[in-house]
Amino acid sequence: MQSVMIVVLGLAGMAFGWFVYSRFIATRIYRLDPDFVTPAHELRDGVDYVPTNRYVLWGHHFTSVAGAAPIVGPAIAVYWGWVPAVLWVTLGTVFFAGVHDFGAIWASARNQGKSIGALSEDVVGKRTRALFMIVIFLVLLMVNAVFGVVIAGLFVDTSTAVFPAWSAIAVALIIGQLLHRNFNLTLLSVLGVAALYTSIYVGSLMPIELPDQMFGLAANANWLIILFVYAAIASMLPVWVLLQPRDFINGMQLFIGLILLYSAVLISLPDISAPAFNSQVGADAPSIVPLLFVTIACGAVSGFHGIVSSGTTSKQLDKETDARFVGYLGAVGEGSLALITIVAVSGAALAATPELWHALYERYGEAGAATFVQGGAQLIQDGWGIPVAVSTTLLATMVVLFAATTMDTGVRLQRYIIQEWGEIYGIGVLRNGVVSTLVAVGCCLFLAFGAGGASGQGGLIIWPLFGSTNQILAGLTLLVISVMLIKLGRPARYTLIPMMFVLITSAWAALLKLIEWYLAGNWLLVAIDLVVIVTSLLVILEAASVIARYRRDNLASETL
């Protein structure tokens, strides 16, 4: 029955966030204007700037920011017990992620769809933009390189997910053309989801595998190359051709998956095998504070969300009032996924007894997406009687599609960053979409194979930096939004308080990791971590200077 309590309390908190808190933020803080002309209309080009139905845009935004992170992070963090994980996911979704994602869309839309990095120049200062871009580029490099490794690994380990994962692209291309011709959205949604689930069933019967060795590379390395070739092509297509319909169908697929998982909990009423607070952590395990707050990023708050919100989502916003639906409700959707992940990896469906659970969670960091797939598949079978083989394929496909969607969007965003660098430094060739895409993909493949050799696992070398770097970026995004609110004369405490908490915990975690890597002699991670810490500190100082100047000006005007 503990599982039902987790579900009810967690969803009740998120419902409060959506129906009450987000409405307050929309009307009193961001003050959305239904008559404001969004960049999608003002700068419409049919490629990146495209006015989009809010339901379709929600699907794009949700699946782009979600990826595998709201599954992997909570699955690892349950190591410290399910109570801390549930509290951070629920409170983080309501007071951190929703405000952050919503705010990044609003701020970007109010500034011609500029990315949060480019926006930082207008809001804070010119030097801030260059510093911000460094952190953003590093986060995108990590996400793209590692998600490619994750998907390739899932294709090798769960070959039944290969057919539905690639079938989803064909389905999305067809739906994109039909949506562009104003076909009925509801009918297309039903047909698209039906086609996707049919492909999942077919995939469970028809595994597809690459040869163990091909062109001198292992199967996972070949999958990695194929994925980046696809991502490069997809990132250059107009958003309505593939990105929007694929993300929308993936969002509908996840929505159904969440219904299956949550209803399975209500039907089977599984017990929780994980402890509320784990007192059997290993001597070498990291401290719950501050590591909990960087282990669970997506599903609570994540800097990557700000890149997506201001990079692709804001350019497709039909009405400014849609920002609440897309941004805040997208965060609620991700929090819901993180919440059910906690139930799946904490319950008896995964491990029948506390002893078996502790055996699975003997060391920090050993759990992940595979743990969620295993526990979730068993939970669906217990609740709905669907065979484990089918539900395993369903959940593995869900993870693959989410990770692939994030990778697609990530490469597109990396292309934007490189093009912006071309504009900033007057390098004309980098402004070209094809060249900037090749540079983006080339950087990812260089990291994958240059650092990882023939295995292509190089992205995993710098992945330990992601947690703290990503959360520092979330804090910096909230900082930019806060400065913008102060300039407009609006209350900024609803973004400043989350900003301070996120920056303190993530900087603390970054410093702890810096010491750990220094003692281990891992100079590459030490160097990159130092760059992130120093860069972030400089951005904070620049912002503090701007805030102080505006306060002085306001006091002077009041005196006069």
Image: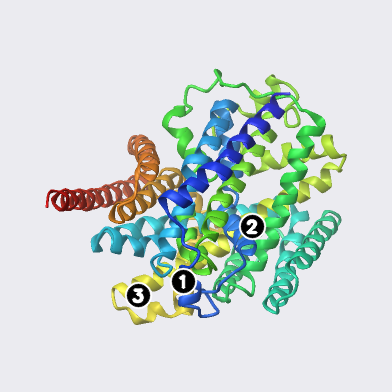
CA distance separating discs 3 and 1? 28 Å
Residue 37 is marked as: 1
Query: For the residues carrying marks 2 and 3, which lies nearer the camera in this image?
Result: 3
Residue 426 left/right relative to 453: left
The residue positioned 73% from the left and 39% from the top of the image is: 262
In-front residue for pair 388/381: 381
In-front residue for pair 25/402: 25
The residue positioned 35% from the left and 50% from the top of the image is: 476
Badge 1 density bin: few <14, some 14–19, many ≥20, Cα 10 Å: some
User: Which mark sits nearer the N-terminus, 1 or 2?
Assistant: 1
Task: Write down the residue under mark 3.
Answer: 422
Q: Position of residue 164 (x, y in %)?
A: 76, 60
The residue positioned 78% from the left and 55% from the top of the image is: 160
Residue 220 is marked as: 2
Residue with the most extreme top position:
279
Query: For the residues carrying marks 1 and 2, which lies nearer the camera in this image?
Result: 1
Place residue 72 in its image quadrant.
top right
Give the vertical position of 326 relative to 81 (above or below).
below
Place residue 397 in its image quadrant.
bottom right
Which type of secondary structure does the marked residue at label 1 adopt? loop
Q: Position of residue 170 (x, y in %)?
A: 73, 71
Residue 109 left/right relative to 546: right
Which type of secondary structure does the marked residue at label 3 adopt? helix
CA distance separating discs 1 and 2? 46 Å
Q: Kindly identify the amino acid type of the residue bearing the numbered disc 3.
A: Gly
